């Protein structure tokens, strides 16, 4: 069972605030622990923010975090008002998605795929 994903962050606090602000995660910090755990109020996997090593290049991974969003257009508009700009909205087979980057230049995507009517795809 998938439960956790580590993001190596050049700035853990900035990255934690990003996921709290735009995706509703709650940051859990334990004294003496350099990892910040981000927990979604809707359940699902936990994002663990780990300080990146000095030699790690930003955004070099081939992982993309995908967030289930029913109304992609409305979410993009709200995020734009709050300072996060997504790229164009793409229409796939029965759903929409858009892409952006987090503060560490990791790829993120919002997608209505989970809400599509599978009978029409």
Image: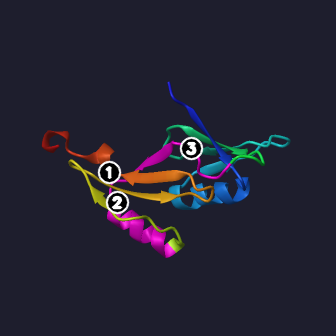
Look at discs 3 and 2 and give the one toward the viewer.
3
Residue 76 within the magenta-colored segment of the rendering: yes
Q: Position of residue 112 (x, y in %)?
A: 32, 51
- With respect to residue 8, does 88 lie above or below? below
Residue displayed at 71% across by 53% down: 10
Segment colored magenta: 57-81
Residue furthest to the right = 32
- With respect to residue 111, does 103 lie above or below? below
Q: Residues within 10 Å of mark 1 (few under 14, many from 20)?
A: many
Lateral position of residue 4 relative to residue 100, left or right: right
Q: Position of residue 18 (x, y in %)?
A: 60, 59
Residue at mark 2: 72
Residue at mark 1: 112
Do residues under tags 3 and 2 come within 8 Å of each other at their CB atoms? no
Residue displayed at 19% across by 40% down: 118
Lateral position of residue 44 relative to residue 9, left or right: left
Q: Residues within 10 Å of mark 3 (few under 14, many from 20)?
A: few
- Separation of disc 1 and disc 3 at Cα? 24 Å
The local secondary structure at tag 3 comes to loop
Which mark sits nearer the N-terminus, 3 or 2? 3
The local secondary structure at tag 1 comes to loop
Residue at mark 3: 61
Residue displayed at 58% across by 34% down: 4
Q: Position of residue 97 (x, y in %)?
A: 34, 55
- With respect to residue 36, does 23 lie above or below? below
Way the structure is coloured = rainbow
């Amino acid at each position: 069972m998938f439960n956790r994903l580590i993001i190596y962050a050049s700035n853990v606090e900035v990255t934690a605030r990003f996921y709290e602000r735009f995706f509703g995660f709650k940051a859990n910090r334990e004294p003496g622990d350099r990892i910040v755990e981000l927990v979604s109020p809707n359940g699902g996997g936990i994002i663990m923010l780990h300080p990146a090593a000095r030699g790690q290049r930003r955004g070099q991974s081939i992982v993309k975090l995908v967030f289930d969003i029913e109304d992609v257009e409305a979410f993009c508009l709200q995020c734009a008002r709050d300072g996060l700009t997504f790229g164009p909205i793409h229409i796939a087979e029965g759903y929409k998605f858009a892409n952006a980057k987090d503060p560490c230049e990791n790829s993120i995507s919002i997608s209505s795929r989970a809400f599509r009517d599978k009978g029409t795809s």
